[in-house]
């Protein structure tokens, strides 16, 4: 499948002709300026072809030539109605629309011939296809696991740091850092990652989260609680202290202080985890709040209000744990927002453009 970008200058008739007669999937939008191409390509992978129009090139030919020279794209194609056109630079290929369609049809037919499978094999292939929803669920699950490993890992690390400082208030900064590094390097860092992964699995099973995806932060809070994360952290800390003591990384006196004061460290870690999950709840609520504000401004065709709500939504989205419903709503808004922005803040959107913005969301 070829992914293409369509710039200004094309009308619906030409777009429909390209979509209906070739294997090109139109995933782009109408652009009002060349930098919008860069912005779009950064957000979508597998952009194999950029289609530009004659009048777009006439208006921005110097900028388009620079894009080609940077060599960020596999192929730039310029479509025109007639064969009278000025010479263009670099990798830009010039086609009449009819010639372009003919070439793409031939490519498509050649791809079909290469597959050369009979009907029975085709049916087997169809039966082995993975449901796209399942792929999406797996992708969300991976993102959530990665987020929890990173977020909870940082939180536990901070709790360990603060707990050590509370037990050894008179220690110099270099000593605290060396002590913490000794614990991390003697199994604590790896042990915590495994502990978080185990807690995620146990918490999902206990919470009957069959899809593998958390739908909200309350489910995460329940999973962390039912998975026994603090108890597991306690065991990992014991292991790391013993190993660091045996290897001489931590002396007997400091080891004893940390062993007897372990509950102080664990209480600090527990408090920091609770704070992190509480903050996550606030972040997700903020994303929803600004999504609602964007929708209201969109209905009122207030682009300044949309822009303000959009930036705030994106800011909190970056901090939030990924949830499928939240991400999908945010990406629909992102697609519509950039579509309107790149059309010169015009709200004159076709039904096809609105549907495309929704399809390109997760």
Image (cartoon, grey):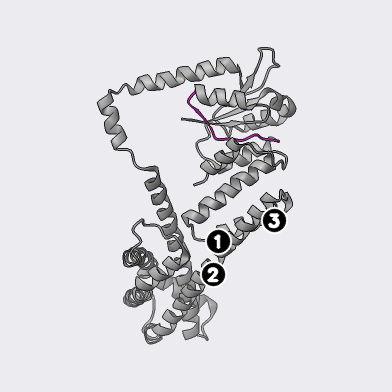
The 10 Å Cα crowd at callout 1, few under 14, some 14 to 19, many 20 or more, is: some
Q: Is residue 167 left or right of residue 114?
A: right
For numbered disc 3, what is the local secondary structure? helix
Foreground pick, 93 / 15: 15
Which percent across, then down, holds residue 269?
45, 76
Q: Is residue 194 above or below residue 264?
A: above
- The mark that comes first in sequence, 2 or 1, is 2
Gap in angstroms between the C-alphas marked 1 and 3: 18 Å
Q: Residue 89 in magenta?
A: no
Based on the displayed image, in which of its 4 quarters is residue 346 positioned? top right
Q: Residue 29 in magenta?
A: yes
The magenta-colored residue range is 22-32
For numbered disc 1, what is the local secondary structure? helix
Q: Is residue 158 left or right of residue 119?
A: right
For numbered disc 2, what is the local secondary structure? helix
Mark number, residue 319: 1
Gap in angstroms between the C-alphas marked 2 and 3: 22 Å
Q: Is residue 138 left or right of residue 7?
A: left
Q: Nearer the viewer, mark 2 or mark 3?
A: 3
Please state the total of marks drawn on the protein image. Answer: 3
- Name the residue carrying label 2: 279
Based on the displayed image, in which of its 4 quarters is residue 296 positioned? bottom right
Q: Is residue 150 above or below residue 138?
A: below
């Amino acid at each position: 499948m070829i992914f293409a970008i369509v710039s200004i200058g094309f009308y619906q008739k030409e777009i429909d002709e390209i979509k209906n007669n070739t294997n090109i999937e139109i995933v782009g939008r109408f652009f009002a300026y060349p930098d919008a191409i860069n912005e779009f390509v950064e957000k979508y992978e597998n952009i194999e072809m950029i289609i530009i129009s004659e009048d777009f090139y006439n208006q921005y030919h110097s900028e388009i030539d620079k894009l080609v020279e940077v060599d960020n794209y596999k192929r730039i194609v310029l479509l025109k109605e007639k064969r009278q056109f000025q010479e263009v630079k670099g990798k830009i290929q010039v086609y009449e629309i009819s010639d372009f369609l003919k070439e793409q049809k031939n490519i498509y037919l050649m791809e079909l011939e290469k597959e050369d499978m009979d009907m029975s094999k085709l049916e087997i292939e169809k039966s082995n296809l993975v449901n796209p929803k399942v792929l999406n669920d797996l992708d969300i699950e991976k993102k959530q696991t990665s987020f929890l490993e990173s977020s909870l890992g940082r939180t536990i690390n901070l709790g360990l740091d603060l707990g050590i400082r509370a037990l050894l208030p008179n220690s110099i900064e270099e000593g605290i850092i060396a002590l913490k590094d000794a614990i991390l390097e003697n199994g604590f860092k790896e042990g915590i990652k495994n502990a978080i992964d185990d807690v995620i699995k146990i918490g999902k099973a206990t919470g009957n989260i069959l899809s593998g995806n958390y739908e909200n932060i309350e489910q995460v809070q329940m999973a962390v609680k039912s998975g026994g994360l603090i108890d597991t952290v306690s065991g990992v800390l014991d292991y790391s202290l013993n190993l660091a003591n045996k290897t001489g990384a931590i002396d007997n006196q400091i080891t004893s202080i940390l062993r007897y004061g372990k509950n102080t460290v664990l209480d600090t870690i527990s408090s920091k985890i609770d704070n992190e999950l509480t903050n996550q709840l606030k972040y997700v609520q903020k994303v929803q709040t600004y999504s609602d504000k964007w929708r209201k401004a969109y209905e009122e065709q207030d682009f300044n209000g949309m822009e303000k709500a959009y930036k705030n939504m994106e800011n909190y989205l970056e901090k939030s744990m990924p949830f499928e419903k939240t991400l999908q709503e945010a990406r629909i808004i992102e697609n519509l927002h950039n579509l309107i922005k790149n059309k010169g803040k015009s709200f004159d959107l076709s039904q096809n453009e609105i549907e495309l913005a929704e399809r390109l969301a997760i």
